[in-house]
Image (cartoon, grey):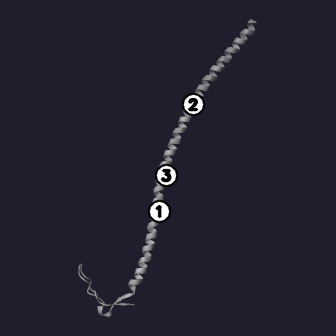
Amino acid sequence: MGEASEGVVAATDAIAAIAVRTNDAALRMSENADSVSNTVQMIAAVSEENSASAEAPSSATEEMSAQIQEVVASAATLSEMAGHLDGLVGRFVLAAEAGPEVPAARVGESAPHAGRRLRVA
């Protein structure tokens, strides 16, 4: 039985050595898994920061677009008002007695044609 027990002892030693290597490999895998987990968390944090950084310009762009639309709407309204005003002003003509040339008034003075009757066309 000496030979058989030596074989059992050798097999047990081999199994023990394999168990130690397996345990060491499991520990290294656990450490690597922690490292990978930390790296993934850092990547997620950077991604969130990038996302937040991208939202600010996007929000500013949307605000500027809305302001530009307001300016365009105001310009259209002013254009309509100017056309209407041109139409109203175009109806008025100075009376023939004012003559072809009417001198401009100085600041604080009345225009030479002030108080004269206007004829509406």
Q: Is 27 situated left or right of 72 in this image?
A: right
> Relative to the observer, which residue lies in front, 66 or 21?
66
Q: Is 102 situated left or right of 14 in this image?
A: left
Q: Residues within 10 Å of mark 3 (few under 14, many from 20)?
A: few
Q: Do labels 1 and 2 touch, CB within 8 Å?
A: no
Residue 79 locus on image (x, y percent): 43, 75
Q: Name the residue under label 3.
A: 55
Residue type at mark 2?
Asn
* Distance Cα–Cα, label 1 vs label 2: 51 Å
Q: Residue at x 23, y 81 (%)?
A: 109
Under tag 3, what secondary structure?
helix
> Relative to the observer, which residue lies in front, 70 or 39?
70
Where is the C terminus found, in terms of image quarters? Answer: bottom left
Q: Residue at x 26, y 86 (%)?
A: 112
- In which quarter of the view is residue 92 placed? bottom left
Q: Nearer the viewer, mark 1 or mark 2?
A: 1
Q: Do labels 3 and 1 touch, CB within 8 Å?
A: no
Q: Nearer the viewer, mark 3 or mark 2?
A: 3
Query: Is residue 40 placed above or below 11 in the rendered structure?
Result: below
Query: Is residue 42 placed above or below 100 in the rendered structure?
Result: above
Under tag 1, what secondary structure?
helix
Residue 35 locus on image (x, y percent): 54, 32
Q: Which of marks 1 and 2 is nearer the N terminus?
A: 2
* Distance Cα–Cα, label 3 vs label 2: 34 Å
Query: Is residue 112 placed above or below 34 in the rendered structure?
Result: below
